[in-house]
Image (cartoon, rainbow, N blue to C red):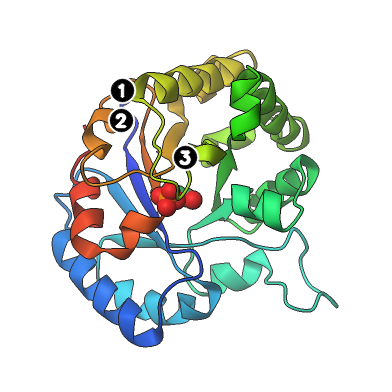
């Protein structure tokens, strides 16, 4: 079984300006080269995708989006179709981020539909799953993760995970400065892999599972060292070039 190549993905969320993203990408791209062991990805706000497609063209950094519609085209004001993202060289699309689930009402089924739509346009979905604080405290973490994962397996089929990435992001750790301990993270990552292995062992071994939730320059290494953690989905720390580069270089 070949080693899984790690992936460090920047999720800029709704931050930046035309000027600031130019500076940030300039600084990040100087620190990433062919020798960088992990794959590096940036997911900017939609309107900056075209600009970034140009800025990243001659670099080793990949481009992605933070969301996409589950539909192809039509009268859906304000929505962006996966094919439009593909037009601008996006290779990855985040689906089911907890902010989409909790603030914009995306349920498991809708997230599964987005996952399928992204793949249908020839891009790789990064499926975010994770439990709320009260779910962890009531010992239902595994139940929640299983439910979120099973919805996608059911709609897309297990083989779809050969061209997908999963991000485990405990909701209580996102933007809070409270990172899961390496043990807590590894436990859930292993659970996710075993859940996939019930359907297909090889697919489960090959899929990259990222950790997200307050990954910082000073805690990335201890998380990325663990057997089932294949990189990170980085919010706040991806807005500071030095911090993000330190994280990119912390992979095993
Ligand atoms: P954070 O965000 O690194 O700021 O916690 C991670 C995410 O939401 O993907």
Q: How many marks?
A: 3
Could you give the CA–CA distance between mark 3 and mark 1, rounded to whole angstroms?
Answer: 18 Å
> Which of disc 1 and disc 3 is earlier in sequence?
3
Please tell me how crowded label 2 is: few (under 14), some (14-19), or many (20+) other residues with Cα within 10 Å.
many
Q: Secondary structure at mark 2?
A: helix
52 above or below 10?
below
Residue 237, position in %: x, y? 32, 55
Residue 148, position in %: x, y? 69, 33
Per the image, the residue denoted by label 1 is 226
Per the image, the residue denoted by label 3 is 173
| Residue sitting nearer the eye, 172 or 68 | 172
Q: Secondary structure at mark 3?
A: helix
Q: Secondary structure at mark 1?
A: loop
228 above or below 63?
above
197 above or below 207?
above
Residue at the location (59% across, 24% down)? 136
Q: Could one spot residue 158 in this view of the protein?
A: no
Please tell me how crowded label 3 is: few (under 14), some (14-19), or many (20+) other residues with Cα within 10 Å.
some
Given the current orientation, which residue lies at the most extreme bottom position? 19
Per the image, the residue denoted by label 2 is 223
CB of mark 2 within 8 Å of CB of mark 1? yes
Q: Quadrant of the C terminus?
A: top left
Is disc 3's CB within 8 Å of ligand 1? yes
């Amino acid at each position: 079984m070949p080693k899984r190549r790690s992936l460090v993905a920047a999720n800029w969320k709704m931050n930046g300006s035309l000027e600031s993203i130019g500076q940030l990408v300039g600084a990040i791209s100087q620190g990433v080269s062919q020798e960088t062991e992990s794959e590096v990805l940036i997911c900017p706000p939609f309107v900056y995708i075209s600009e970034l497609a140009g800025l990243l063209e001659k670099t080793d950094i990949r481009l992605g989006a933070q969301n996409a519609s589950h539909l192809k085209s039509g009268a859906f004001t304000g929505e962006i179709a996966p094919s439009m993202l593909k037009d601008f060289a996006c290779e990855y699309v985040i689906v089911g981020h907890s902010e989409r689930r909790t603030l914009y009402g995306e349920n498991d089924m809708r997230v599964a539909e987005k996952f399928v739509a992204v793949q249908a346009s020839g891009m790789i979905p990064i499926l975010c799953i994770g439990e709320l604080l009260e779910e962890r405290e009531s010992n239902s973490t595994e139940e929640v993760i299983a439910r979120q994962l099973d919805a996608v397996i059911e709609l897309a089929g297990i083989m779809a995970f050969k061209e997908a990435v999963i991000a485990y992001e405990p909701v209580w750790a996102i933007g809070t400065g409270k990172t899961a301990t390496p043990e807590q993270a590894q436990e859930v990552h292993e659970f996710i892999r075993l859940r996939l292995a019930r359907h297909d062992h090889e697919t489960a071994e090959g899929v990259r599972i990222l950790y997200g939730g307050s990954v910082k320059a000073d805690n990335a290494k201890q998380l990325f060292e663990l057997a089932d953690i294949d990189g990170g989905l980085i919010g706040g720390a991806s807005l500071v070039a030095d911090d993000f580069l330190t994280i990119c270089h912390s992979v095993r």
